[in-house]
Image (cartoon, rainbow, N blue to C red):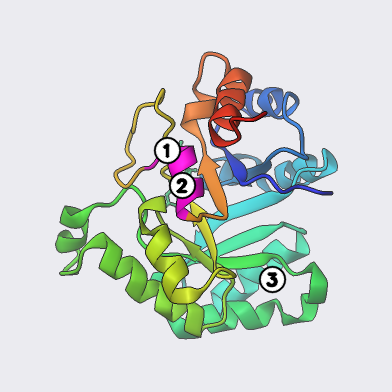
Amino acid sequence: MNNTSPIVVALDFEQKSAALNLVSQLDPALCRLKVGKEMFTHFGPDFVKELQQRKFDVFLDLKFHDIPNTVAKAVKASADLGVWMVNVHACGGSRMMIAAREALESFGKEKPLLIAVTVLTSMEQSDLVELGINLTPQQQVLRLAGLVDQSGLDGVVCSAQEAVELKQQFGKEFCLVTPGIRPAFATADDQKRVMTPADALQAGVDYMVIGRPITKAADPLSALQQIYREIYPAH
Ligand SMILES: O=c1ccn([C@@H]2O[C@H](COP(=O)(O)O)[C@@H](O)[C@H]2O)c(=O)[nH]1
């Protein structure tokens, strides 16, 4: 499939039928899909397979964070499912991330992209202070991204606000996946470090994860089309 779109639609629905109703309106050549903790807990691997049967690339966003052995096995199980991308928490440390990477070695070209969450886009400075981290979100993202890079992963989940500096520091091949994307028409909800789709693309992000601005819109398809027009004004 020739999918060059940077858009990953976050499917966070209580009802599978509601998710599939949206998915049936989407084109797998124009976006990828993200399955996170809510839908995976409700509907499991079968839901992921259903999306794959509809030819969508799936980002399995379960943010594994556990001892190295457990994370390695969970990442391998994700690769067995044939997902396009899987993630862990960088806070699990380099031994955990290296174990995750090594668990994918036997998958060769079929291996999913393996990325690590740095600082959640819902977090701001005061949330870090509460955790005893006396760094700005930007500094903490850069610090964790360094660990991710050294551990040989493909990239990070961060906010688009950190994209320019991360690309400068780790190079253009270091994959940046950014939730916290908010078009001008949308509310921020619980996201703190946000950016519009056009600005995020300009900042150099590789994939932007967009959920509620599309899924909670009165007309999800037209919200997605509006985002496309914002990113690619010529279309
Ligand atoms: O730092 C992170 C990591 C993951 N997420 C996930 O992305 C989507 C965002 O959804 P919106 O509705 O567009 O806010 C959601 O599934 C989160 O679990 C994130 O937001 N931030």
Distance (Cα) linking label 2 and label 3: 31 Å
**Is there any visible trace of residue 14 in the rendered image?**
no
Residue at 64% x, 73% y is 73
Residue found farthest to the front:
234
Q: Are marks 1 and 2 in contact (CB under 8 Å)?
A: yes
Q: Which residue is mark 1?
A: 196
Depth check: give the residue in front, 57 or 196.
Answer: 196
Are there few (<14), some (14-19), or many (20+) residues within 10 Å of tag 3? many
Q: Does residue 22 appear left or right of residue 68 in this picture?
A: right
Q: Does residue 209 appear left or right of residue 192 in this picture?
A: right
Q: Which residue is mark 2?
A: 200
Under tag 2, what secondary structure?
Answer: helix
Under tag 3, what secondary structure?
Answer: helix
The magenta span reads: 195-203
Could you tell me the amino acid type at mark 3?
A: Lys
Residue found farthest to the top:
218
Compared to residue 85, the image places residue 114 above or below, namely below
Image location (x, y in percent) of residue 6: 62, 47
Q: Which residue is mark 3?
A: 76
